[in-house]
């Protein structure tokens, strides 16, 4: 079995039905400090997510490759 390094940081994308305010302030409503690991996060609406994924940007490509729905 190959050795793996422990994960020390998560990247989290939260897709919500609605979200108010600018993206950099939306995180204030999520208790990310209660997660067991440090987390980089972005909160976006379904419409923003769909637009991002259709853009073909590098971020969209990385999300396409790495995103796991929970």
Image (spheres, helix red, strand yellow):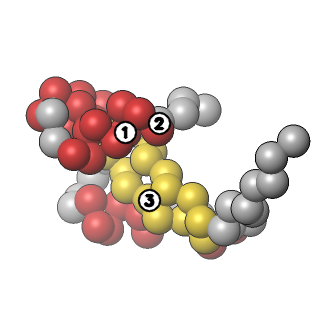
Q: Is disc 1 in contact with disc 2, using a CB cutoff of under 8 Å?
A: yes
Residue that lies at the very extreme toward the front in this rendered image: 2
Q: Quadrant of the C terminus?
A: top right
Residue 29 appears in the rendering: no
Residue 12, horizontal then vertical, whole percent: 49, 52
Q: Residue at x 31, y 68 (%)?
A: 25
Q: Mark 1: which secondary structure? A: helix
Residue that lies at the very extreme toward the left in this rendered image: 55
Residue 68, horizontal then vertical, whole percent: 54, 33
Q: Quadrant of residue 32?
A: bottom right
Residue nearer the viewer, 23 or 59: 59
Q: Is residue 34 above or below residue 64?
A: below
Q: Residue at x 43, y 69 (%)?
A: 28
Total labels drawn? 3
Q: Is disc 3 in contact with disc 1, using a CB cutoff of under 8 Å?
A: no
Residue 47, horizontal then vertical, whole percent: 22, 31
Q: Label 1 to label 2, Cα distance in Å?
A: 5 Å
Q: Going from the N terminus, do you reach mark 3 or mark 1 first? A: 3
Residue nearer the viewer, 31 or 63: 63
In this picture, residue 26 sits left or right of residue 1: left
Residue nearer the viewer, 17 or 40: 40
Q: Residue at x 44, y 45 (%)?
A: 14
Q: Mark 3: which secondary structure? A: strand
Q: Label 3 to label 1, Cα distance in Å?
A: 13 Å
Residue that lies at the very extreme toward the right in this rendered image: 1
Q: Residues within 10 Å of mark 3 (few under 14, many from 20)?
A: some
Q: Which residue is mark 3?
A: 41
Q: Which residue is mark 2?
A: 67
Q: Going from the N terminus, do you reach mark 2 or mark 3 first? A: 3
Q: Residue at x 28, y 37 (%)?
A: 61
Q: Which mark is residue 63?
A: 1
């Amino acid at each position: 079995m190959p050795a793996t390094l422990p994960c020390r940081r998560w990247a989290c994308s939260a897709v919500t039905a609605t979200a108010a305010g600018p993206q950099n302030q939306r995180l204030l409503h999520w208790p990310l400090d209660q997660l067991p690991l440090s987390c980089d996060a972005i909160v976006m609406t379904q419409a923003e997510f769909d637009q991002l994924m259709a853009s073909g940007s590098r971020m969209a490509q990385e999300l396409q490759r790495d995103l796991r729905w929970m």
